[in-house]
Amino acid sequence: MTERPDSSTAEVRSLAKWYAAARAALAHNRPLTSAAALEHPRSRDLSTGEVEALRRVGAFKDEAPVRPDRDPLLVSQAQYMALLEESLSAADAAKRLRVDVSRIRQRLRDRSLYGVEYDGSWRLPRFQFEGRLVLPGLAQVLKALPSDLFPLDVVDFFLLADPELRTDRDTAPFSPRAWLLAGRPIEPVVALARDLTRA
């Protein structure tokens, strides 16, 4: 009979699985909500430092009323870690856009770029970049989004298909990111962002 792993071991395994799936989704601008269901083949164990960092912020519970492989808190923690890891630093974003890093900080203040401040530095999620350019209409959409929206929700807003972003010619709805990249009008995406503000 195999010994059942204790809850913290199961939590670490679940975190590692979701972390790998979320990183893979973010790297390819796929929504995080679908990443939790994926088993990524390159899933790896979390490093001792990653486990300890999660332990310090209370990620692991002494008693787990929810199975670790179904715990939404663990999923969101793994996705948040992956978001930080897969995002660009301010210096990387400056290099990509061929501007000075001070311009990136200014755009973050103006809300024409989106960033997550973590441990004294900025992380800029990849969804807002396409090659060496910024997503068309990004500034208008960001200014319409609630400023206190959780980072994972911002990512999913841009990457999840929305039934409102579809014309009679389309076979499937677009995500806001895909809609804007296709050169479609910005206004429907801004309206969706404003709806979140009213919610």
Image (spheres, helix red, strand yellow):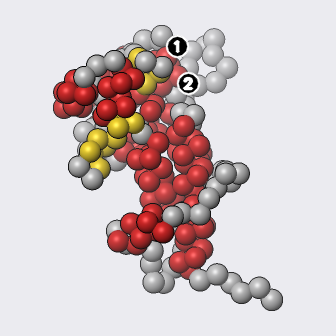
Along the line of sight, the residue nearer the viewer: 74 or 53: 53
Residue 29: x, y in percent? 53, 33
Along the line of sight, the residue nearer the viewer: 189 or 140: 140
Say which element carries label 2: loop
Task: Say which residue appears at 31% left-offset and 38% top-offset.
Answer: 115
Q: What is the number of callouts on the image? A: 2
| Residue 140 visible in this rendered orientation of the protein | no
| Residue 108 visible in this rendered orientation of the protein | yes
Residue 156: x, y in percent? 47, 39
The image's mark for residue 14 is none
Mark 2 crowdedness (10 Å alpha carbons): few <14, some 14-19, many ≥20 = many
Task: Say which residue appears at 26% left-offset and 45% top-offset.
Answer: 121
Task: Say which residue appears at 21% left-offset and 31% top-offset.
Answer: 105
Q: Is residue 118 left or right of residue 16?
A: left
Q: Is residue 93 above or below residue 181?
A: below
Tell me which label, 1 or 2, sits earlier in the chain.
2
The image's mark for residue 182 is 1
Q: CA distance from mark 1 to mark 2?
A: 9 Å
